[in-house]
Image: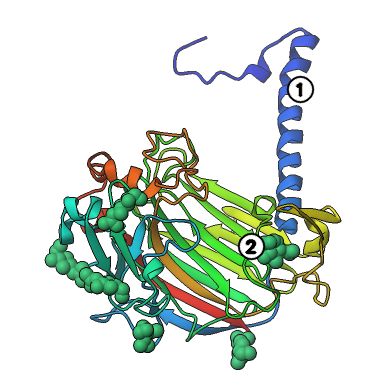
Amino acid sequence: MLTGEIYKPWLEKKDPLARMAYWLTYVVAAIGIGASVVRCWFAAKSVNMMTGNLCLILDDEFNGDSLDTDIWDYEVTMGGFGNNEFEMTTDSSNNTFLRDGYLYILPTLTSDVIGRDAIMNGYTYNITGCTTGGTNDTSTCGAVSNITGGTVINPVMSARINTKKSRSIRYGRVEIKAKNPNGDWLWPALWMLPVNNTYGPWPMSGEIDIMESRGNGLSYADQGSNYVQGSLNWGPLTWLNEVWRTTGWWTERRTSFASGFHTYAMEWDENFIRIYVDSRLHGMLQVSFNVPFFDRGDFPPVVTNGSQQVVLENPWASGSKSTPFDIPFYLIMNVAVGGTNGWFPDNVGDKPWFNTATDAMQQFAEEQDKWAATWPEDDYSRALVVDYVKMWQKC
Ligand SMILES: *[C@@H]1O[C@H](CO)[C@@H](O)[C@H](O)[C@H]1NC(C)=O
Ligand SMILES: *[C@@H]1O[C@H](CO)[C@@H](O)[C@H](O)[C@H]1NC(C)=O
Ligand SMILES: *[C@@H]1O[C@H](CO)[C@@H](O)[C@H](O)[C@H]1NC(C)=O
Ligand SMILES: *[C@@H]1O[C@H](CO)[C@@H](O)[C@H](O)[C@H]1NC(C)=O
Ligand SMILES: *[C@@H]1O[C@H](CO)[C@@H](O)[C@H](O)[C@H]1NC(C)=O
Ligand SMILES: *[C@@H]1O[C@H](CO)[C@@H](O)[C@H](O)[C@H]1NC(C)=O
């Protein structure tokens, strides 16, 4: 063969078997491509699409000087929200503020305000503006540090805001563009709860988690900041949550959801809920409402409650296949820290507390030097930074 001449294998004389093998390669490739097209078509068809119209009911781009309190309420507490979370949530501009057209929810160290010694022993801290009870509710609006008693002042200040009083949807769409926080044991969440507990207390009336993640780095073995999760929480009793049946996630192999902005979306109508990131094709979770939730749970007829046997009642018997996801839900955005509910499992990573320990928060506070060292100095890297929030009601 001359150099510069184009090699044309099909012009070469070959034995018939070699020629057949040659063409077979192309035939098999063509079949492969055809099969992929068919597969994509069926995959696309199985993705539910919303029908009907959407009416925009909230479009907050956070361009003002301060959070619009006609829309958002602060949840101020030291109570840990049933998960024994280690942060207290404040209404302070240290933890929630607008800057350059973005909302920041920024975790800060309580030691910056009262010092390390006060956190560990001999101090009483009462949070101002507590929303979980009167100032007399010392269990959630105040804390006492006592080194021998195993109690500390919540070592982190953070924030949690919601639209409960102002905006809710019953079917529709939510879209939030946000950058997640960096830092060990941070737990950012964009999620929804029912306005009314129509079918009973949590999780009987449902919970929709649009995005939950962890601030731990990519080396963390139980899904660090390169994972985002979507899920539905539901169950027929307060201690029976079937969230594991309706949980999914999206992951990026080498990039973190805490290194840049991503768009989180939830679409919801009478037939399905779909939660995805950036593109409809990057689905975290899709739940078709084709089976009533009580059947989906595959529950035993009788469950054990302490020493009692309880006949399991269907709290959604009066509803439809989408019940309990057929009532108005409002939006919540927060950055939590730690907690003992298993979001951070024991024995994964260099975890400074045990979820079963009664003094878990004290264990966490003792290791502050270790975890605080992983929290970036600059606000932008450490915060949950939100570009905009949009909510549409199906109309
Ligand atoms: C905000 O942070 C500053 C600096 O750490 C502190 O002095 C101040 O007390 C904090 N404000 C509140 C309300 O915690
Ligand atoms: C707190 O307790 C005092 C004294 O018992 C009572 O007068 C006050 O109304 C209580 N405050 C709240 C907010 O419950
Ligand atoms: C905190 O609140 C408790 C209960 O209302 C009260 O007894 C205590 O004096 C308060 N402590 C501080 C430091 O404000
Ligand atoms: C601290 O806790 C210990 C053990 O529970 C208890 O004996 C002690 O009275 C507590 N101290 C204060 C100041 O409450
Ligand atoms: C929630 O319940 C209250 C009291 O029954 C009622 O006034 C309100 O309209 C309900 N809100 C929604 C969104 O269902
Ligand atoms: C379960 O047991 C607790 C404590 O005895 C009781 O308060 C609760 O009502 C029981 N729940 C059911 C569904 O029986």
Query: Which of pointers 1 and 2 indicates the residue nearer the eye?
Result: 2
Which quarter holds ligand 1? bottom left
Camera sees residue 141: yes
Q: Residue at x 55, y 80 (%)?
A: 392
Q: Is residue 38 above or below residue 144?
A: above
* Location of residue 311 in the rendering, given as x and y in whole percent from the top left corner: 84, 61
Q: Residues within 10 Å of mark 2 (few under 14, many from 20)?
A: many
Q: Is residue 356 left or right of residue 21?
A: left
Q: Which amino acid does label 2 sit on?
A: Arg
* Location of residue 300 in the rendering, given as x and y in whole percent from the top left corner: 83, 52
In the foreground, 322 or 198:
198
**Residue that numbered label 1 is attached to:** 24
Camera sees residue 93: no
* Location of residue 21 in the rendering, given as x and y in whole percent from the top left corner: 75, 16
Q: Which of the labelled discs sits on residue 274, or is there none?
A: 2
Q: Which amino acid does label 1 sit on?
A: Leu
Distance Cα–Cα, label 1 vs label 2: 42 Å
Q: Residue at x 49, y 81 (%)?
A: 164
Q: Earlier in the sequence, mark 1 or mark 2?
A: 1
Q: In this view, does 229 lie to the left or right of 225?
A: right
The image quarter containing residue 233 is: bottom right
SS at mark 2? strand
In the foreground, 180 or 365:
365
Q: Is residue 267 above or below residue 47?
A: below
Q: Is residue 232 above or below residue 76?
A: above
